Amino acid sequence: MARNPVELAIFDCDGVLVDSERICVKVDVVITADLGCTFTEEEIIEKFVGSSTEVYTAAVEEQLGRRLEKDWLRQYEHLYRAALDAELTAVDGVAEALNGLAIPVCVASNTDHADLRRNLEIVALSDHFEGRIFSAADVSRGKPAPDLFLHAARSMGVEPGRCAVIEDSAYGVQAARSAGMRAFGYCGGLTPASRLEGPGTTLFDDMRDLPRLLATASH
């Protein structure tokens, strides 16, 4: 049975468009240590990469054995911004991939709108997504729930079964599957391929291969 053609590519941002996760993991180590619940880089990659703020908060609270204030993370935002300003680059090959795609694209990320736009501007990718940026702030539940991807597809006027999601985290791939979308798991970053593989998921480690993979998925 022929599969529906891919009519929309939905990109995660962190670790897919911008190489931010390596930077943010180091900041997370500093933050959790400051709070009094030390996590290693490996633990942060496994537990938090690609997750929502709610997932992050719950894990920290569990480790601390106490509740945090509602906006606890805000006091640390300057650490992320300073590190990203100094070190942020685009994911290798993603500019070529975007230029090689013949279908519409959008971005759907757990990051808030202001930081999404800022990070995309830093790496000169914002023009690809003007007016097509979706954040977990737009929906009631972030990834791993499917809400954000479904919202993006609705806003773009494309059925979920005709969408492809490009993700690099276990949470993101789970959200794509739950949304009934095809997942393309980029394993050239921090998350090992073993945590991304599963039904309806194509793994790849070079962004330059993406246009070909999406075209092949439509046949």
Image (cartoon, helix red, strand yellow):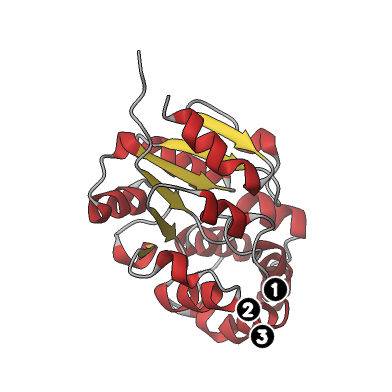
Q: Which of marks 3 and 1 precedes in the sequence? A: 1
Tell me the residue at 36%/32% (across/down): 5
Asked where in the image residue 2 lies, by quadrant, the reply is top left
Q: Amino acid at mark 2?
A: Tyr
Residue 160 percent coordinates (x, y): 30, 39
Q: Determine which residue is flagged by label 2.
A: 80
Crowd tier of the residue under label 1, counting other residues whose Cα lies within 10 Å: few below 14, some 14–19, many 20 or above: some
Which quarter of the picture shows residue 219? top left
Image height of 43 relative to 210, above or below: below
Name which residue type carries label 1: Val
Distance of mark 2 from mark 1, alpha carbons? 6 Å
For mark 3, give the secondary structure. Answer: helix
Q: Residues within 10 Å of mark 3 (few under 14, many from 20)?
A: few
Please tell me whether mark 2 sits on a helix, a strand or a loop: helix
Q: Residues within 10 Å of mark 2 (few under 14, many from 20)?
A: some
Is residue 163 visible to the viewer in this orientation of the structure? yes
Q: Vertical placement of 38 versus 181: above or below? A: below
Q: Which residue is mark 3?
A: 82
Q: Would you say the residues marked 3 and 2 are in contact, meaning their CB atoms lie under 8 Å apart?
A: yes
- On the image, the x and y values in percent for residue 218 come to 42, 29
Cβ atoms under marks 2 and 1 closer than 8 Å: yes
| Quarter of the N terminus within the rendering | top left
